Image (cartoon, grey):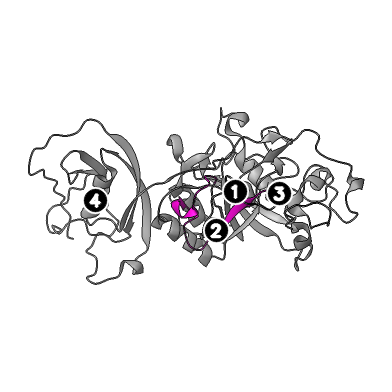
Amino acid sequence: MKKLFIVAMALCISPIAVDAESVRLVVSQGSVIKISAMAALPIVVPANTCLLTSDGMREICVPTPVSKNVTSRTVGASPKAIEKEFSTIIVDADSVDQVIDTLKGTGWYYSVEIDVSVSSNTKEPMLAYNDNVEVSEQSVDAPNDPEYINQTYLQGNDGIRDLAFSNITEAGNSVINKTRNVGIAVLDSAFAENDELTFTGGYSFSTAFDEERNENYFLQDGQERDACIMHGYGVAGVMTTAINDGQTIAGIINNVDTYALRVMNCGSGYLSDSAAALNYLAKQEVTNAPMFTGHVDVANMSLSGPADTCPSYMQDAIDNANKAGIIVVVAAGNDNRNTSSFTPGNCTGVIVVGALSKEGERANISNYGDNVTLAAQGMDILSFGVEAKTVYWWEGTSFAAP
């Protein structure tokens, strides 16, 4: 059997910079990768391989990209024909561009990209103090949830109030198959449950702040609900709160299987974790996660991060989800800027949702542009929040998307 020998040499001595920042990158390689032409020599494969950056200013060490079957790539083979495996690495960098160029120059990877920092970017919700009215003031065919009268985004135009009605309730009444459960996945953070809102299952994909993937998709031990503002709880509440149970608010539709996928830690995290969660839903193999056995029709990502283009690891995950029949809905972002500068809103194969005021005007915080697919009311949205079953006013594209 031929064995592999890796040699790392510095041909000159250069001053090494001492001031650097850690940068998190996402790299991809195929299941079969060539890392040396010296395959006939004795094998010594270290866990890490260290390189000088192309400017000679820093030594960076990365996991040695060895697969189980290390052979040369077939000459002329298209990278598109090889299934890419994405992984994250963290290196110290004086210049991110230099590190990316250095790693690309090794020929070990199909892609080397920044792991985009994402957030829910939503203001803390306001407590809804006694905003409900008597159910008798609502139309006789309206849900009996006390706060429904204030959920203008669910209602049809009554010809009296000048509001941006979405008529979601009537749309729900038009669903042909009312017995089939709809599978909804919420990719977010800070989830909780109550007797009106429960989850069929879920998983935590967040690796921010040195977290490891695990089965607990609720708050971590020691985290406070008010510090995390319970964004995922609020987003899920808009969609999947029970309708017509006479308690608080109404959701979008009954008969749902809801999955909570925690991809951020208290509202901030990395895009690669959202990509991993989408791949999980598409029943792809994901490192440190079980195979998904449920069924999902819609995945909601009320998160965004700055990026001029859609990273390939995110686009691949969206493509996998689409092929699995999953509609991917993302928030446009709350920066009052063109969505083309934010991801995953600038990816293809997604429904990008901007936010409207309840009067039907673009919300002054909502991102905009050609990438936006549609807009929905995103201001004055009622859902759950910090307290267990208390109703709050939320705002932003995070709440237009659900």
Q: CA distance from mark 4 to mark 3?
A: 48 Å
Q: To which residue does mark 4 refer?
A: 101
Residue 372 image label: 2
Toward the bottom, the furthest residue is 76
Q: Which label's residue is closer to the chain start, 4 or 1?
A: 4
* Lateral position of residue 153 relative to residue 302, left or right: right
Camera-nearest residue between 176 and 371: 371
SS at circle 1: helix
Q: Quadrant of residue 122?
A: top right
Residue at 15%, 59% in the rendered image: 37
Quadrant of the snapshot with the N terminus: bottom left
Question: Of the residues tagged 2 and 4, which is closer to the observer?
Answer: 2
Camera-nearest residue between 205 and 12: 12
Q: Is residue 157 above or below residue 93?
A: below
Q: CA distance from mark 4 to mark 1?
A: 36 Å
Q: To which residue does mark 1 refer?
A: 397
Question: Of the residues tagged 4 and 1, which is closer to the observer?
Answer: 1
Q: CA distance from mark 3 to mark 2?
A: 18 Å
SS at circle 4: helix
Question: Of the residues tagged 3 and 1, which is closer to the observer?
Answer: 3
Which amino acid lies under the numbered mark 1 shown in the image of this protein? Thr
Which amino acid lies under the numbered mark 4 shown in the image of this protein? Asp
* Lateral position of residue 185 relative to residue 308, left or right: right
Which amino acid lies under the numbered mark 2 shown in the image of this protein? Val
Q: Which label's residue is closer to the chain start, 2 or 1?
A: 2
Task: Find the magenta span and give its range.
Answer: 334-357
SS at circle 3: loop
| Disc 1: CA contacts within 10 A as few (<14), some (14-19) or many (>=20) | many
Residue 358 image label: 3
